Image (cartoon, helix red, strand yellow):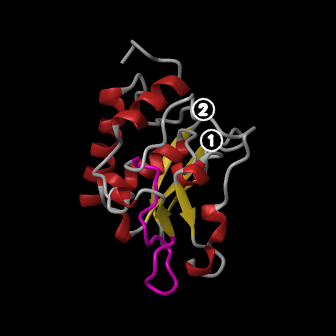
Amino acid sequence: QYAKNVIKKSMQVWESNTCIKFIPANNKKSALVFMRGTGCSSYIGHMQHWTKQPVSIGYNCEHIHTISHEIGHALGFLHTHTRADRDQYIWIKFNNIQGGLASNFMRTSQRDNHNYGLPYDYGSVMHYSKKAFTSNSDLTIVPRTSLYEDTMGSGTGPTFIDILMMNMHYKCLGNA
């Protein structure tokens, strides 16, 4: 029940600030299905060949920030720290990342990069923390400006820029 409430609150955060509305599936064409998983994950964007798109919510994922992050993926968002221009703002320390997880830190090509000209957002709900997937307790993401070190991955939900980007992505500026 606790997880259900956090999922609802996370959806409400996106709904209250965008034109996106989540409605009960009731055998609709396509739906997000939140399921108990071993971790926190979602496919990126609408998977057209599925009617039920899984969003995995593990026991350590029951936080508004984390579920808002996974909803962001389901709605089409990539990780902020993979932006094509990320090297201007952060360094990725691949030697500190757990084996097999480096793909979560790979830079997006300019072609697949959809940031709508918005500034880099260290506090984005889509940004990993400074020690995400560390193999040795050292930093995996280092901001070029140390002031932002504790900002990364520390938020409680989508930032103003996350909301603005979602509104731009779904062409709903002024319709929220």
Q: Which residues are magenta?
A: 124-140
Q: Amino acid at mark 1?
A: Thr
Quickly name the residue at label 1: 51
Residue in the image at 56% along x and 80% along y: 96
Q: Is residue 131 visible?
A: yes
Give the structural element (helix, strand or loop) at label 2: loop
Residue neighbourhood size for the residue with mark 1, other residues' Cα within 10 Å, grouped as few (<14), some (14–19), many (≥20)? some
**For the residues marked 1 and 2, what is the alpha-carbon distance in whole angstroms?**
6 Å
Q: Do the numbered discs 1 and 2 sit on residues whose CB atoms are within 8 Å?
A: yes
User: Farthest residue in the front direction?
Assistant: 145
Could you tell me how many numbered marks the image carries? 2
* Image location (x, y in percent) of residue 79: 54, 51
Residue 127 higher or lower than 23, as above or below: below
Quarter of the figure that contains the C terminus? top left
Quickly name the residue at label 2: 29
Residue 134 higher or lower than 79, as above or below: below
Dominant secondary structure (helix, strand or loop) of the stretch shown in magenta:
loop
Residue in the image at 52% along x and 84% along y: 135
Asked if residue 18 lies in the magenta stretch, the reply is no
Residue closest to the eye, 172 or 35: 172
Residue closest to the eye, 94 or 65: 94
Where is residue 95, by image quadrant? bottom right
Residue in the image at 49% along x and 49% along y: 33
Residue neighbourhood size for the residue with mark 2, other residues' Cα within 10 Å, grouped as few (<14), some (14–19), many (≥20)? few
Quarter of the figure that contains the N terminus? bottom left
Q: Amino acid at mark 2?
A: Lys
1 or 2: tag closer to the N-terminus: 2
